[in-house]
Image (cartoon, helix red, strand yellow):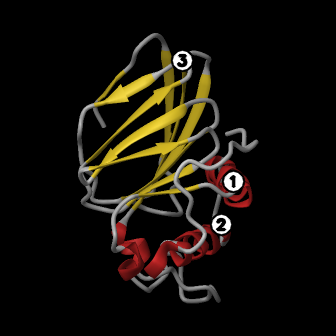
Amino acid sequence: MATEWDGYATAQVWRPVSYPGLVLYRVSGRANSQALHVHDELQLTLDAGHVQQVSCGGARLTALPGSLVVIPPGEVHALRGEGGRPGVLCGMLVPAAFLGGSSPSGPELEDEPPGEELLLGGCAVLDDPEVARDFVALHRALRAPGLEREPRLWVLLAGLLSRLGPGRAGLMLGGGAHQASP
């Protein structure tokens, strides 16, 4: 991902061996901006310190600190974090294969990965403190050395994508801020 940073920033990237293709990242800094780009993966991003301006599929959305930005695979997008104070952004690139109905970590999981069809309708901002806390906790767990399997990955994805289905129940564009610290 090509990123231009205003001010300073540090970035860390993890690729959990147990989940081939999954990429986790964590960026700390004052502000950031990106050129328009696209991923083959589902992108989930939460910035705990900045207001995110999201350009996605021709639309402009605002994500207040602690809101989860959901960008489907193949959507042209850019994020710009603003706020003037240092912030921490954590994100996840989830391979489309993880969304297709069979668990990459084995058939013994009770919860199957959610279906890709729920991503129809473009980008979204999910303003829900509980989802934000779950996302941050999952991000931390997936970064742990020696992780073999983290079943919360499927629970989080299923919960997120069910909220992104027809009608987008539970989604708010630009609601209140929450406390989720990556």
> Does residue 40 appear in the picture of this structure?
yes
Disc nearest the viewer among 3 and 2: 3
In the drawing, what numbered circle is on residue 35?
none
Residue at the image point whose x is 31% and y is 37% from the top: 1
In three-dimensional space, the C-alpha distance between marks 3 and 1, rounded to whole angstroms, equals: 25 Å
Q: Amino acid at mark 2?
A: Glu
> Considering the numbered disc 1 on the image, is that residue within a helix, a strand or a loop?
helix
Task: Identify the amino acid type marked 1.
Answer: Ala
Question: Looking at the figure, which quarter contains the C terminus?
Answer: top right
| Residue nearer the viewer, 33 or 151 | 33
73 vs 85, nearest the viewer: 85
**Residue that mark 1 sits on:** 141
For marks 3 and 1, give the one nearer the viewer.
3
Whether residue 129 is situated above or below residue 85 in the rendered picture: below
Residue under label 3 = 30
Work out how far the residue at label 2 is from the one at label 1, CA to CA, in angstroms. Answer: 7 Å
* In the foreground, 54 or 180: 54
Coordinates of residue 115 in the picture (x, y in percent):
43, 82
- Which comes before the other along the chain, label 3 or label 1? 3
Q: Please tell me which residue is depicted at 24% across the width and 51% down the height of the picture.
A: 58
Position above or below: 2 against 121? above
As helix, strand or loop, the secondary structure at mark 2 comes to loop
Q: Which mark is residue 150?
A: 2
On screen, 137 above or below 12?
below
